[in-house]
């Protein structure tokens, strides 16, 4: 089977990471969650009082980018790689609603994007990677053999996110999650640098009415057909 790169982009909470993890496992590829990298830089900014509801010291954050180290380490129990910020596992912390509230602001900064895109491209030098994000098919891997663009209604996405966060014990309301999703959709798709747009050659999947299994069947078939067509 030919080795390929699979780029999965789409709006927040469209289930990109769920399908990306499933595909990576089945194909024995590496899964890279690019959003986790933007979230980890945001967490760093929060921990160092560089961002809050009332201030954002952008230049200071840019000046310390070189000392922010991001690594992924495979967790055999979970079956995917977790993210480490300066050698500390922050996989759970970066999913908090507070990080979600600030991350779009951090992801707008070109210097941040340049640093993270460079690292993401290194992960893909040998192909056999499934990466999800917002600009994977357009900026990180414009030559990816397969590009998927995920979509679903904002309400459906908020409902799924609400269930996920309440299940793990976070105190959140449906309304605040819906607002956060709509806000991130807006910033992600209107920012100047690498806005979220569907690549011309991406295949769009709306999973509003699909179960996780149905989604996997559909996308896995697309992947296999693509690999077979390249033989
Ligand atoms: O996929 P996610 O929700 O964990 O991503 C968090 C934020 O990071 C998202 O609001 C936009 C940003 N992001 C980005 O700008 N580019 C990417 N490739 C991935 C995420």
Image: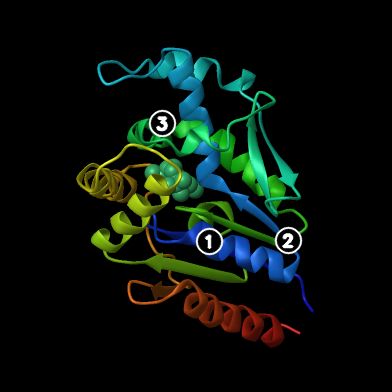
- Up-down: is 218 above or below 124? below
| Residue under the point 61% across and 60% down | 21
Earlier in the chain: of badge 1 and badge 2, it is: 1
Q: Which residue carries the number 1 mark?
A: 18
Q: Which residue carries the number 3 mark?
A: 106
Earlier in the chain: of badge 3 and badge 1, it is: 1
> What is the quadrant of the C terminus in the image?
bottom right
Residue 175 coordinates in the image, percent (x, y): 20, 46
Is any part of residue 75 visible from this angle?
A: yes
Question: Would you say the residues marked 3 and 2 are in contact, meaning their CB atoms lie under 8 Å apart?
Answer: no
Q: In which quarter of the image is residue 65?
A: top right
Alpha carbon separation for disc pair 3 and 1: 24 Å
Is any part of residue 137 visible from this angle?
A: no
Question: Would you say the residues marked 3 and 1 are in contact, meaning their CB atoms lie under 8 Å apart?
Answer: no
Earlier in the chain: of badge 3 and badge 2, it is: 3
Q: Which residue carries the number 2 mark?
A: 127
Marks 1, 2: nearer the viewer? 1
Residue 206 coordinates in the image, percent (x, y): 36, 73
- Up-down: is 54 above or below 156? above
Alpha carbon separation for disc pair 3 and 2: 28 Å
Residue 43 coordinates in the image, percent (x, y): 48, 26
115 or 25, nearer to the observer: 25
| Left or right: 205 in relation to 111 | left
> What is the quadrant of the N terminus in the image?
bottom right
- Up-down: is 102 above or below 230? above
């Amino acid at each position: 089977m030919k080795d390929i790169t699979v780029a999965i982009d789409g709006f927040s909470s469209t289930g990109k990471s769920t399908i990306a993890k499933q595909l990576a496992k089945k194909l024995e590829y590496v899964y890279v969650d690019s959003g986790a990298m933007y979230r980890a830089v945001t967490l760093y900014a929060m921990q160092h009082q560089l961002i809050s509801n009332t201030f954002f010291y952008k230049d200071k954050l840019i000046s310390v980018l070189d000392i922010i180290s991001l690594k992924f380490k495979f967790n055999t129990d979970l079956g995917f790689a977790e993210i480490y910020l300066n050698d500390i596992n922050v996989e759970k912390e970066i999913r908090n609603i507070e990080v979600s509230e600030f991350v779009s602001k951090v992801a707008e900064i070109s210097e941040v994007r340049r640093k993270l895109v460079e690292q993401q491209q290194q992960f893909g030098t040998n192909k056999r990677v499934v990466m999800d994000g917002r600009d994977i098919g357009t900026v990180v891997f414009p030559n990816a053999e397969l590009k998927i663009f995920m979509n679903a209604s904002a309400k459906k996405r908020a409902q799924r996110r609400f269930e996920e966060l309440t299940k793990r014990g976070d105190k959140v309301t449906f309304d605040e999650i819906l607002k956060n999703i709509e806000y991130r959709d807006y910033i992600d798709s209107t920012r100047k640098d690498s806005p979220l747009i569907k690549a011309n050659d991406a295949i769009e999947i709306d999973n509003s009415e699909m179960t996780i299994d149905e989604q996997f069947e559909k996308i896995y078939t697309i992947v296999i057909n693509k690999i077979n067509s390249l033989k």
